[in-house]
Image: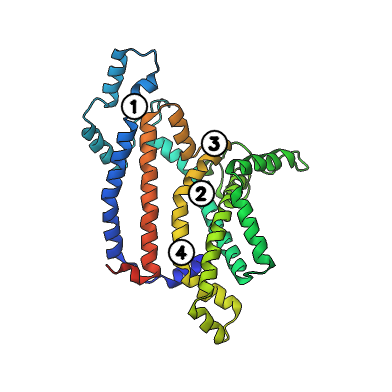
Amino acid sequence: MFFHLLTGVAGAVPWKYIVRRTLYCVPVYLGIVLLMMLALRVRDPVPAFMGKNATVEEIAQRRTEYGLDRPFFIQYGIFVGRILTMNFQQESWQQEGRTIGEILRGGLGPTLALTVPALFLTTIVSVSVALVSAWFRGRLPDRLLVISAVFGMSVSFLVYIIVGQYFLGFAIRGSTGAAPFAISGYESLQQTSFVEYATTKWPYYCLLPVMISVLVSMGYDTRFYRAVMVDESQRDYIVTARAKGASQPRIMFIHLLKNAMIPVITRVSISIPFLITGSFLLEMYFRIPGIGRALITAVFQADFPVVQAIAAVFAAVYLASNLLTDVLYAMVDPRVRLS
């Protein structure tokens, strides 16, 4: 329903607006990469990688080998060139024989297997619950839903993970003695057929962390969407629709939801970067080999090129989510395109 309405209100794609916003993002991204590289070089990464027993000559040799003895802006230009050409063939310092590109490609699938379903389900469920809450505003169902949302957002992410792993990974056992969900590990799509992966492997390895992510996000999103829906329900066009005899479902799901698209789009777009960072905990505690787990592992191992590359990728994702917000704004409300 949500995406059907979004498609229905979308007009012609505003290409000029998209190009203008994209060009605006380019210097912003270059500035972010510049600051990120400066921050990572506040402390020389080579001694941290080689350890305290390394000699000055060995450190200098490694620094030359890795290209860190060059002037900073030359390093900056080389790294930006690699980003623009998607050339991540530089080898990891810790994982011998593996390039940064292989690490990114290997972690992309598991990360998307968590974040995409979590974002989709969180949006659908939160908007639906908010509509129901706004429909019964001030009555018992509304109060129960608000209390549930406040309770959900008051519980720590780690509590959800620990409780979920215990009760759905250890305590509940079927007739075969196996738990309904795995608490560790991951099986990729390349290791099985798509049908088997979607019906058995993905639910077993990923459904529990996705449900935890949805529960954590729902508390915040439901309260926000409810406030938007309640505010929209008091607008003049809603009063006019009721006066014309429109049914309550039509008012809520057609008139109200269509006009509430911009706040909903804002919330969804803002949630994307935080959803990815939230998956770090899930990937670590469930031992899912995603990009977040690769980043945390690289930080602990002082794997400098991997940390630098993944940080640049996450910065690009954050800017892309902001750009997507602007584009969807322009499609939903043509007034946004006016300069």
Q: Earlier in the sequence, mark 4 or mark 1?
A: 1
Q: Earlier in the sequence, mark 3 or mark 1?
A: 1
Which quadrant of the structure image shows residue 324?
A: bottom left
Q: Earlier in the sequence, mark 4 or mark 3?
A: 4
Q: Earlier in the sequence, mark 3 or mark 2?
A: 2
User: Which residue is painted at 43% across and 31% down in the image?
Assistant: 299
Can residue 172 be seen by looking at this rendering? yes
Task: Identify the residue position indicated by label 1 in the image.
Answer: 43
Q: CA distance from mark 3 to mark 2?
A: 14 Å
Give residue 265's position: percent from left, percent from top: 45, 62
**Which color mode does the image show?**
rainbow
The crowd level at tag 4 (other Cα within 10 Å; few <14, some 14-19, many 20+) is some
Q: Which mark is residue 263?
A: 4
Q: Nearer the viewer, residue 131 or 307?
A: 131
Marks 2/4 in contact by CB < 8 Å: the verdict is no
Q: In the rendered view, would you say 210 is above or below 240?
A: above
Q: Amino acid at mark 3?
A: Met
In this view, which residue lies farthest toward the bottom?
244
Q: Amino acid at mark 4?
A: Pro
Q: Earlier in the sequence, mark 2 or mark 4?
A: 2
Q: CA distance from mark 4 to mark 3?
A: 32 Å
Task: Identify the residue position indicated by label 2 in the image.
Answer: 115
